[in-house]
Image (cartoon, helix red, strand yellow):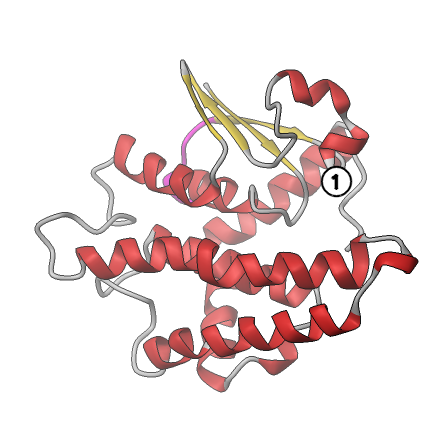
Amino acid sequence: MITLYHCTAARSFRPLWALEELKLPYELKMLPFPPRVFAKEYLALNPLGTIPLMMDGDVRMTESAAIVQYLATRYGPTPLAVGLDEADFGAYLNWLHFGEATLTFPQTLVLRYSRLEPEGRRNPQVAADYSKWFLGRLLAVEAAVASRETLCGGRFTVADVSVGYALLLAERIGLAENFGPAVAAYWRRLQQRDGFCRAVNAEIAAGEQQKVAATSW
């Protein structure tokens, strides 16, 4: 049984969404955000205190984009992955990691310096600068989905899960109002997927059952 440690709307939503798309059995462990502060017992499992942590037998992984790649490869073959023999294999890997390294990273600084730091340590200029950085990098997605439904392979893949989470985070922190028309339409399509809806419902149900409050940001 796969076990996923998760905070509502955190990066761990990527593997949760992928698990639902793959229809794999899993156990979802909800934690308050940030767990390194509010769930110190979690540090015994993941000394970094970061989310996600995915355990699959002896496998332990903490990088969200790597986890979705692992799941689609380990539990394939599946159309959610683009194969080595397909023309879009390189584009698939690039988008898969673009979602985290290029799109999510600047948003973490926006989140930190606009909401998470104590009032005296917040920095509106840092938040504004990294908001512009994110929106500038998002132009690549705008161009990619202006003429097609998904990012690569002619179908929905875990690359869309990776980038889709960055759009979810942008909505949570107030950046979605600046999406271009193609990205806005793409994000609407992603939210209509059964796998996405099941993932959202799973985190709500698990949070209520385990009495863990949803992340407030």
- Pick the quarter of the image with the N terminus: top left
Residue found farthest to the left: 85
Disc 1: which residue: 33
Q: Residue at x 23, y 65 (%)?
A: 154
Q: Residue at x 43, y 54 (%)?
A: 161
153 to 3, vertically: above or below: below
Crowd tier of the residue under label 1, counting other residues whose Cα lies within 10 Å: few below 14, some 14–19, many 20 or above: many
Q: Position of residue 5 (x, y in %)?
A: 60, 30
Q: Residue at x 21, y 51 (%)?
A: 82
Q: Is the stretch drawn in magenta largely helix, strand or loop?
A: loop
Residue found farthest to the bottom: 181
The answer to whether 45 appears left or right of 79 in the picture is: right
Q: Nearest the camera: 119 or 79?
A: 119
200 to 172, vertically: above or below: above
The answer to whether 149 appears left or right of 49 in the picture is: left
Q: Nearest the camera: 30 or 129?
A: 129
Q: Residue at x 33, y 35 (%)?
A: 70
41 to 146, vertically: above or below: above
Residue found farthest to the right: 120
Q: Position of residue 115 (x, y in %)?
A: 80, 59
The answer to whether 71 appears left or right of 206 in the picture is: left
Is residue 23 inside the magenta stretch? yes
Question: Dot 1 lies on which element?
Answer: loop
Q: Nearest the camera: 14 or 93?
A: 93
The span picked out in magenta is 21-25
Q: Position of residue 137 (x, y in %)?
A: 46, 73
Q: Is residue 10 visible?
A: yes
Amino acid type, residue under disc 1 in the picture: Phe
Is residue 73 inside the magenta stretch? no
Q: Nearest the camera: 89 or 157?
A: 89
The quadrant holding residue 49 is top right
Q: Is residue 192 visible?
A: no
